[in-house]
Image (cartoon, coloured by chain):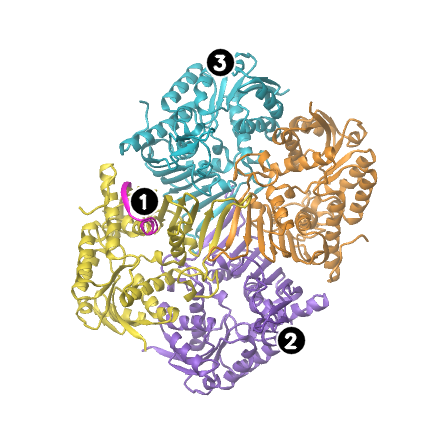
Chain colours: A orange, B cyan, C yellow, D purple
């Protein structure tokens, strides 16, 4: 007999849909020791909730997210709502003794994140944040290679997460432009991904200096009036890592041409790695050595030898897609819930990401290097 | 209320698993007008069937595939078994009035395929063959561009489907090396994919001349003895298309380094397209014209403007994976079953593919150009 | 003291200019054991010859190419004129006891080429044909790797040389469209390059079957009238090699988007190579083996470890250009003249290329496999 | 009659050789209005000078570089010596009324560079610095596209010049590790190239914050003892540009795998450009707009429509090499000498580059943003 865990998902939009696909597919892909049950979907009102529950395959719908917390059968609360709601919902879930699976960024700032991380830790519930790009088997492979020393000591990281979804000045003012609802702009939305990646692969960031810029200062409201954009469109950052490497981090929501422009290059004393999420099934690897006339970057295609991949396909090069990353992420969640495994990014780690973001903001204000830290 | 269609799947291996994932995911991805129900799984014996049914989420299991035909509740029979079984199973399904969704290649040769196509047409059941690479939104986009004349009249096609899964001579003799069980070698296994692609995009092939070669003449049996490989490891073919283009087709199962090496280049009088399945989320497009100093191939990333993609993600560049192609393929199946839509590849079209393969074999024997045809 | 060899160049157009650049640069690049002296330039009349001699740095000019043969001081006759003139000029040079450096293709057909090769051999003069793409250090590296068995026995070659310089139907009728002046169309012009490359790397071609097509049947003459194009715009060919490999060769002068589209892929039993002249400083190499999770094509950048490169630059990745290939080719010529080295492509080898081209033409007429041979 | 300008070259090493090749080739490539005459070569002693003069084709040799200044026939002094000698030699040449063509970086620091720029300006001699990567026709094309607004207002620049020539800790201590002889480390050597490129394309840099790191703190001397490396192996920098863009600059001499890793990405409000010197014949261009389903980066191959290229070849995609850039650079020099054209990088501009480098050094010491400026 399979065991099921009951999921209460708050938010049935684009990201909520990736959750639903992952919950549905996971048992078949990974073989189903534990089966996520699409138990309840919460949306902002019952009509929407009912429509989305039916579309996404949830058995129950509610227009009041607190119903999710109140239902004793629900094991895991998944939060796929705008940033400003994460804190209240997560704290309520923790208070109700639920495991919490929250979308990124965890919070509007490090203070909120700290409160959430502490609450989760105190309650002893599983807590995980949806930094989905880490789930890529090639990122797992990169981490294995780094950790076992294939590249030697790491000395350099350059990463970016750039997209162009707000490059057109005709894109209207939305909640992501509103500091109250979104916190930072591109830093929280996409910068958090590349910061997360950097820290996942290289360890903690101990100091940053940053430059933030709002490129399109005003955008149109629904009524046609202009409203000032309250956060940054692009951000640049120099970073120092705990283990000694230095790095560059960059994010933009106005980078014409980049559609999923999360990319990085890592240099170690004896090798290098290059990755670009737009070619997510490839990892380039350079290893120094005595290969007379045969030095060069090797392009690894994702393959069964890489973590998790074989569950999708037994043959190399039969690539994964964006939605598949969520399926792997859900497997990490289930492993945490069922077997006590450490999630790739728990609230504590996500709090550190928020601290780096906050440090970037403060650095941009002061022009100085700032250490990410509890304040 | 959603309508469900009950699926009876024969074969719970690697390809059967992609079926199961697709049936599970489809309702969430595509919105669920019709929901495929994982009703029954057949395998070669009951123990295996039960294990696979549980793993893949099927409600029932049987060790006798004829049970699938006998169950009046089953709407669609999906056949994911080795090639030599396709004909008997498909004919039985047709005889039972079931819709049939058969994996490629349809049959061991064109004669078998003709019999199957005629039976399906006579019975009036929906019949479709799983040439999954056609389901890619960028292939659909390529077809739109070709059909509306973006490239002008097509004059050239060069395509290949090469992999290296049998490049190692230590790979043992398997059913794919046995002419009785497999028919041709790489021609039927992967060559059929690139022939299918060529005909999907350019129309019928009217003549071929081909060269076939078995590179590794013997392979080891389980008992350690050597057995002669009975079909080709690589095949090259020149082709002429009905509409006037000339082409080159190539396939290999011993092409070191190629993991999913289905790739093609199409030249028209005013433009060109380049595609490589190992970078399945990219399509390169060249358009001639008066762009002083700005001529070049443009790399299109898959995007919501391309067919079907928006069901997976609303944002460009958030790529699809190999398994996602099956979800789109299942959507075509359901559209055929529910709304009478024409499947991308029905038995008739799959029969034409077998005719091209047979023509290649005959050409290789005679050294002459051969017209694919009923014999 | 340096020794000089005096060059008489016939033809001061585009290709003649690459000769002049190479003769000028060679002593500095390669260190000048033997220095090519730009002694005399012949063009179709004296005025043009004088203008071109001054532009290209030749000391003397003549409007009569027979003056080159008559001058006893000239050591090497370089022929950079349209195809139809090669035979008469080369035979005259050989008769005058000159070494001959002839541009490709050697002749209009294999019969002419045979006569030229025999004459050169009888006379004992150095004879070399300008198949410049062979001069690339990465091609030399590829040959080294193939010959020492890095790829195992070669089983497959796929090559093309496609460009789009005649894709526009408004390109006027020129001598390349005239069978009397050009012989074949794209086969002789660019097809000869990829045939040459294939035979350089894999050895002789023993049999071909081919398909030729004229895509734009008429082009405008200077007076505005239309004239029928007399040779092929694109050609496809299956080939068998002496050592057992099978191959595909392709050429087109109407392939939209391809500017220098000479590219090939070679598969051996244990490895593969991929090259594209549009990225002429890269060679991709795949080696099979027990690299758990680290299989992939490696991209080699041209480097001092590769033949000839160090003469240009001591640092890897500081790439060569198209004109640099001619400098290396001239070095091979000088090595042949001074030290009796075997040229990369002598008249005998160039004759074999013409035999393959002729065999393609005959195959296209008969629909059968044809063995390239003296007739 | 052609006019000649007599060149006195100081330094006959690797870079001196690129000079010699360029002087030799220029008249043929560009058509020779003015012909550079390889008049005199100076090296550290007469024996070396004589050997190098003969190898590189210079008519005269001297072991005393002041002979170059003293010879009244010499028009242009070309300086291809280690950094620490640039100032003294350039000032002497200027004092002698010679035009000066100095290799990069101009000086050890901004103070030196300021003195040199002022002297050159006062003397009224042509002065130019050899930032060869600017000479690429595709860089010229990029500048045209930026200046005419094809990308809209530029908002972002990310550039790097990384190589791995000192990544191996066994590379001995050389003059580049010695602050007295080299000034900065990778900043002056390669960082100067990417700073130069950034300012060439985007205009002046007004502020920087930087992080410098010596990764390999000691290297071996010839006698086997270890000596402390006195300057940085890698440097990261955030920059602000005069016209409003923000940028990231990076340089490393220990970046495993990068052989000529000068690369950049430029984002404007309506388009983007991407360039990588390791693929120096390609420029990627993205233009926003209403291209339903056809958005993407276009890869431009170098072509006759791009500045200077047609002098090398009349056909697109017949790429240039590293040494060809020097030929174009020499053409700019001759245009300055003969026609008063503004050199791409004169001493004044090179001084600004040194100011940016100095500002990076000071910023790294203070942790603050620093404005590049005369001090």
Tell if the residue under mark 1 belongs to the same chain as the one under mark 3: no
- Of tags 2 and 1, the one toward the viewer is 1
Magenta stretch: give its range.
Answer: C197-211
User: Is C153 positioned to the left or the right of D366 in the image?
Assistant: left
Query: Closest to the observer: B235 or A351?
Result: B235
Chain of the residue under the numbered disc 3 shown in the image: B
- Residue beneath label 2, please? D374
Q: Quadrant of residue C28?
A: bottom left
**Label 1 – label 3 distance at C-alpha:** 54 Å
- Residue beneath label 1, please? C243
Percent of width and height locating residue C253: 33, 49
Is the C-beta separation of discs 1 and 3 under 8 Å?
Answer: no
User: Which residue is rendered at x = 72% and y = 51% of the image?
Assistant: A230
Query: Closest to the observer: C297 or A258?
Result: C297
Percent of width and height locating residue A238: 67, 58
Could you say which disc has been placed on residue B97 in the image?
3
Q: Is residue D358 above or below residue D142?
A: below
In the rendered view of the protein, which quadrant contains the N terminus of chain D? bottom left
Chain of the residue under the numbered disc 2 shown in the image: D
- Of tags 1 and 3, the one toward the viewer is 1
Mark 1: secondary structure: loop
Q: Quadrant of residue B365?
A: top left
Mark 2: secondary structure: loop
User: Which residue is rendered at x = 37% and y = 24% of the image?
Assistant: B110
Q: Is residue C19 above or below residue D334?
A: above
């Amino acid at each position: 007999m399979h065991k099921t865990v009951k999921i209460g998902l708050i938010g049935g939009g684009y990201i909520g849909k990736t959750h639903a696909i992952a919950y549905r597919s996971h048992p078949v892909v990974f073989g189903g020791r534990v089966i996520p049950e699409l138990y309840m979907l919460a949306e902002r009102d019952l009509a929407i909730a009912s429509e989305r529950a039916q579309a996404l395959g949830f058995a129950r719908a509610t227009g009041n997210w607190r119903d999710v917390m109140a239902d004793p059968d629900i094991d895991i609360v998944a939060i796929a709502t705008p940033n400003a709601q994460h804190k209240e919902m997560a704290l309520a879930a923790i208070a109700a003794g639920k495991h919490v699976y929250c979308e990124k960024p965890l919070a509007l700032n490090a203070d909120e994140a700290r409160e959430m991380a502490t609450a989760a830790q105190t309650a002893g519930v599983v807590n995980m944040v949806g930094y989905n790009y880490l789930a890529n088997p090639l990122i797992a492979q990169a981490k294995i290679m780094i950790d076992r020393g294939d590249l030697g000591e790491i000395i350099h990281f350059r990463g970016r997460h750039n997209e162009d979804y707000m490059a057109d000045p005709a894109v209207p003012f939305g909640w992501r432009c509103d500091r109250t609802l979104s916190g930072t702009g591109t830093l929280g939305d996409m910068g958090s991904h590349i910061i997360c990646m950097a820290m996942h692969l290289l360890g903690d960031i101990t100091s940053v200096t940053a430059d933030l810029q709002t490129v399109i200062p005003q955008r149109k409201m629904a009524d046609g009036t202009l409203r000032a954009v309250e956060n940054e469109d692009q951000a640049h950052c120099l970073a120092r890592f705990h283990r000694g490497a230095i790095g560059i981090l960059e994010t933009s929501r106005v980078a014409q041409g980049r559609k999923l422009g999360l990319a990085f290059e890592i240099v170690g004393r004896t090798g290098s790695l290059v990755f670009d999420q737009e070619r997510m099934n490839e990892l380039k690897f350079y290893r120094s050595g005595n290969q007379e006339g045969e030095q060069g970057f090797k392009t690894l295609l994702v393959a069964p030898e890489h973590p998790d991949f074989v569950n999708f396909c037994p043959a190399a090069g039969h690539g994964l897609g964006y939605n598949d990353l969520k399926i792997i992420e859900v497997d990490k969640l289930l492993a945490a819930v069922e077997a006590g495994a450490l999630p790739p990014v728990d609230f504590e780690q996500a709090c550190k990401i928020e601290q780096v973001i906050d440090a970037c903001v403060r650095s941009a204000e002061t022009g100085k290097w700032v250490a990410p830290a509890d304040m």
